[in-house]
Amino acid sequence: MKHTIYHNARCKKSREGLELLKNSGKEFVIREYLKDPLSAKELEQLLAKLSYAPIQLVRTGEKVWKENYKGKDLSEDELIHITVENPKLIERPIVENDKNAVVGRPATEIDKLL
């Protein structure tokens, strides 16, 4: 079963997740989602695999969130649109396989998929 890691090379937690995958011996692909952003449909599919509501995937500590969206009553569709437009807001790393996904915080969460 192939795994995909949604990776941000500038993030320590994301690098830890990538290292764990490399050491697992499992086949995987790296998607640098800041360079290759997810579409709304891809994000919706990922949320379904995670069993997350869109707000659960948002990094609410990010400046763009605090300045533009904090405290607003946003629908799930609006949250998906906001995270697609601002991929930096997506929690990381995320690892998925054909059926499931996990947010690798801490990195040991990735073991659940392996």
Image (cartoon, rainbow, N blue to C red):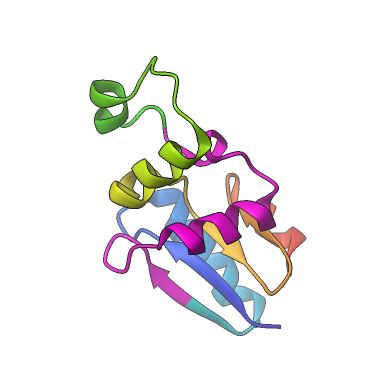
Number of labelled discs? Answer: 0
2 horizontally vs 81: left or right = right
Residue 89 percent location from the top left of the image: 36, 42
Residue 52 percent location from the top left of the image: 64, 43
Residue 81 percent location from the top left of the image: 38, 46
47 horizontally vs 30: left or right = right
The residue depicted at 72 percent of the width and 61 percent of the height is: 111
The residue depicted at 76 percent of the width and 59 percent of the height is: 112
11 horizontally vs 45: left or right = left
- Where 69 falls versus 53 (above or below)? above
Indicate the quadrant containing the C terminus: top left, top right, bottom left or bottom right. Answer: bottom right
Q: Is residue 91 magenta?
A: no
Indicate the quadrant containing the N terminus: top left, top right, bottom left or bottom right. Answer: bottom right
Extent of the magenta region: 30-59
* Viewer-nearest residue: 91 or 46: 46
- Where 25 falls versus 48 (above or below)? below
Q: Residue furthest top?
A: 71
The residue depicted at 58 percent of the width and 58 percent of the height is: 46
Residue 73 percent location from the top left of the image: 44, 19
* Viewer-nearest residue: 77 or 49: 77
The residue depicted at 68 percent of the width and 58 percent of the height is: 49
3 horizontally vs 58: left or right = right
* Viewer-nearest residue: 53 or 102: 53
Residue 26 picture quarter: bottom right
